[in-house]
Amino acid sequence: MSAEAAKTAPKNRVLLAVSQQMARLDVAGLPRNYELFHEAITGGDAALTREVMALNPSPTQMLLDEIGLRHRLPSFMGLSANVTRKHDIELIAGLSEKVARGVSQKQTFARALESVARSLRSDGTGNVSDVLSEIEYLTNSISEAMTAETELTSALKTSAEKLAASERATSSAREASLRDRLTSLPNHIALSERLEGLYSATAEGRRTALFLVSLNRLFDATQVPNDTVGNRVLKKSASIFRNTIKKNDFVARIGPREFAFLFDNVGQENVGAIADRLNNSIINGLQLIPEENRPATLPMELSIGVALTDDAHSPQELRSRAAVALDSALSNPRQPVVIGGGKAVARTARA
């Protein structure tokens, strides 16, 4: 098997498994459904896997959406946002109706007060019973106005609480959509937003390096990356990477065995040292995993593709350069670190 075929084989098997499972259950080919089944087959959430694998043939889309929303999959968060917006609109419409009712009651009272005042001015000889009748009319009118005001105050308080809860739910959903489910690291969506920020009008223009990193030999050519041991290694690797970077740096999991890093204030002269630091952290950190929890082979060296903001004019170009560099590094184990443009970086430490 060629190096390129070996590299793509696990990914192709996952896609085939997803398609076959969806076809077997007669599930509509919607993008969010593909994500649901992809997460069930490759993700680290055992509860999600059990739910999806227990589905009966021809499940309703509503049922699939409920599962996706319950497990906070990114593609389903838009559905949650739409439902939240609909509820907010209904809430505001109800408030508007109550406000209008309260205004109407106040207008009624104002008219009653004006009518009574006019009657008293024009009929100074009126008897006591007539005056009492006018006062009773005013009392009833103001009572109705006060009732409407009390209802409005209560409705405003309840609605404010519901809107605050809605904001919290939206914020929580937003945060979940930016996290990798297995490792809790930021995901590819969060990386894309960070890259956009590097080229925004308000960016400070500091030099930044994008590292795309692949854990070599984590999964062999016949293995789909969803086994428990492999997931333990991925979680441990994520923890190692998180503790390796500095406060202002960034790490995300963007693929089955791929991670992305953004290193602030870094140029080409720093790439080799950073690559060695990442590589050595993995070599040393994964050796601490108990032997019974290790896969047959460990990723004893990383393949790394690097791109620098100095050389790219857009987020897309930066990521493309890094991806090409990573492909080059993967296809040539003797050059485990490559900078966009095809330049290999000399290593001071090799596993």
Image (tube, rainbow, N blue to C red):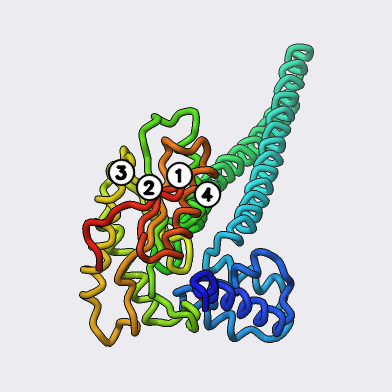
Given the image, on which type of amino acid does mark 4 rest? Ser
| Residue 263, percent from left and from top | 33, 45
- Label 3 or label 4, whichever lies nearer to me, is 4
Marks 3 and 4, how far apart at CA: 23 Å
Q: Earlier in the sequence, mark 2 or mark 1?
A: 1
Depth check, mark 3 against mark 2: the one in front is: 2
70 relative position to 271: left or right = right
Q: Is residue 132 above or below residue 90?
A: above
Q: Assess disc 2: are there few (<14), some (14-19) or many (≥20) residues with their C-alpha within 10 Å of its C-alpha.
A: many
**Residue position marked by numbered label 3 in the rendering:** 248
* Residue pointed to by mark 2: 262
Measure how far apart labels 2 and 4 are at the Cα level. 15 Å
Residue at numbered disc 1: 194
Mark closer to the chain start, 1 or 4: 1
Q: Position of residue 83 (x, y in %)?
A: 65, 56
Residue position marked by numbered label 4 in the rendering = 320
Please name which of the two marks, 2 or 4, marks the residue nearer to the observer.
Answer: 4
In this rendering, the answer to whether 293 lies above or below 196 is below
Structural crowding at the residue carrying mark 3, measured as other residues with C-alpha within 10 Å and reported as few (<14), some (14–19) or many (≥20): few
Q: Are marks 2 and 1 in contact (CB under 8 Å)?
A: yes
Where, by quadrant of the figure, is residue 36 drawn?
Answer: bottom right
Residue 34 horizontal side relative to residue 320, left or right: right
Q: What is the crowding at mark 1: few (fewer than 14 residues within 10 Å), some, or many (at least 20)? A: some
Screen quadrant of the C terminus: bottom left
Which amino acid does the dot numbered 1 rest on?
Answer: Arg
The percent position of residue 311, horizontal first and vertical second, equals 45, 37
The kind of residue on which mark 2 rests is: Leu
Question: Please, what secondary structure does the residue beneath circle 3 have?
Answer: loop
Q: CA distance from mark 2 to mark 1?
A: 9 Å
Q: CA distance from mark 3 to mark 2?
A: 9 Å
Label whose residue precedes the other's in the sequence (3 or 4): 3
Q: CA distance from mark 3 to mark 1?
A: 12 Å
